[in-house]
Image (spheres, coloured by chain):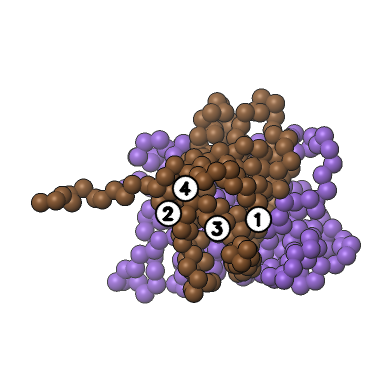
Amino acid sequence: MSKSSSSTRLGDLAWSKSPKTSSSLFTLTYGVLVQHLCSSQTPSLEVNASLRKIGQNIGIRLIDDYISKTSLLSPNSPQQCTSFINTSEAISKVGLKMFLGITADVRVDSENSYTLILSSNPLADFVELPSSRSDLQYSNVLAGCIQGCLESVGFEVEVTIVKDTVWGDEGVEVKVEGKGRKKEELEGGFKDE
Amino acid sequence: MSALPPPLSIIPLEPLESNYNRPLDRQIPLTTLSTPYVSRDLFELLLSSIITQVVSQTSPTTTETTQSSEASAALIEAMGYSVGLRVAPLLLLPDMNDNGRSNGEEGSENEMGNPQALPAPPPLPGIDPGNSLSIVKYLCKDFWVGVFGKQIDKLQTNHRGVFVLKDYSFSLLKRIPTTTSPTSPSPLLSDSSRILAIRILAYPCGLIRGALSSFGFKNSVVSCDFLNDGRNVESTSFNIRIQS
């Protein structure tokens, strides 16, 4: 219990310290990106893949920001997630709050998977999908971002968007499944002589 | 060495006005945004991902021609136009551009906007819609604050439709890698940084052009320059020519 409230406090603190910009600008910019991808790469499958890749690139850079900001704000309590399930706390209460200004609920599905439940989707405010694009994973950039962040800290994961407001659902559900730790790869050349 | 692309002479692409004017199936009040703000760092990351994506699509090979770098800059500018067109009227409304108090957020961190949220604000505070100077002043103040967190540092005009907006520490350029050279006391941009900076600047040029268009000034040309004033590399000026 105390852990969760300290995460919430950390999230709020980090959010209050971060420079902000209008969310409509963000939503519109993302919308324009998706439009551009849809017009140039027609199959939805390719657009989904591009969005995921973009999300992964963002995630890799975002994790550095996250680590530096949280370690600055709470130098005494260690922020490293000791288990896979602990990452759900870090993402839902701290990460999502400090970057998107929202928090999510967590539903632990098993020892190695959890689902983040967001009540709304900041990427998709006022977005309607045309019927020809109903299989578009509009929020794939969010999935890719979470994947990129977790992979950068050593967890192999599979992230999927299960529910999304653009598909008419009430909120967004993101399923995160852990596939174990990443094997550390040493640079070539280290051999036992 | 390939020549750098000429200063952005913008090729206006079709704005998506037909979709924009289509009535939504349900009315959505503006106050039902998921969140009034997002982190600006996240926005900047999104923007640089967009630029990377556009560049990889327009120049699939590693050799960049002038044509392809112009094409990518034009595409980024068109995206900025599309966004600016829609976001400019939104940033006029105080509940989209204040410190979050109207949405019930506690402990308002007042990085931008008005210090107090007025209960029923007029939609066009102090703006005379037909007057280009008034609109440009709005761009320099509320619009720039809503997007970049600060105002334009200096505005100049010749009162005949030409405006120069100077920003001495433009936030999108803060993270560009710079080099130092023994001959110059202040940091410089390397060539690849310069190309990247031009692409990044295409977006706010489009934002400005879209914002002007949303107020009815559809024939404007917006370009930008590096100020190179020796202070820092992020000084830029945006030059607007409004044809009346």
Q: Quadrant of residue B135?
A: bottom right
Which color was chain A given? Answer: brown
Q: Is residue B110 left or right of residue A152?
A: right
Residue A153 is tagged as 2
Q: Earlier in the sequence, mark 1 or mark 3?
A: 3
> Along the line of sight, which residue is nearer the eye, B137 or A11?
A11
The residue identified by callout 3 is A90
Question: Amino acid type of disc 1?
Answer: Thr
Q: Earlier in the sequence, mark 2 or mark 1?
A: 1
CA neighbours of label 1 inside 10 A, class few (<14), some (14 to 19), many (20+): many
Residue A148 is tagged as 4
* Alpha carbons under labels 4 and 3: distance apart: 14 Å
Q: Which of the chains bears the disc numbered 2?
A: A
Which quadrant, please, contains the N terminus of chain A? bottom right
Circles 4 and 3: CB distance less than 8 Å?
A: no
Question: Amino acid type of disc 3?
Answer: Ala
Identified at 72% across, 57% down, the residue is B36
> Along the line of sight, which residue is nearer the eye, B181 or A145?
A145
Q: Which of the chains bears the disc numbered 3?
A: A
Please tell me whether mark 4 sits on a helix, a strand or a loop: helix
- Asked if badges 3 and 2 are on one and the same chain, I answer yes
Q: Earlier in the sequence, mark 4 or mark 3?
A: 3
Question: Amino acid type of disc 4?
Answer: Gly
Identified at 49% across, 73% down, the residue is A75
- Residue A56, placed above or below residue A91: above
Question: Amino acid type of disc 2?
Answer: Val
Please tell me whether mark 1 sits on a helix, a strand or a loop: loop
Q: Earlier in the sequence, mark 4 or mark 2?
A: 4
Circles 1 and 4: CB distance less than 8 Å?
A: no
Circles 2 and 1: CB distance less than 8 Å?
A: no
Please tell me whether mark 2 sits on a helix, a strand or a loop: loop
**Residue B229 placed where, x, y %?**
47, 70
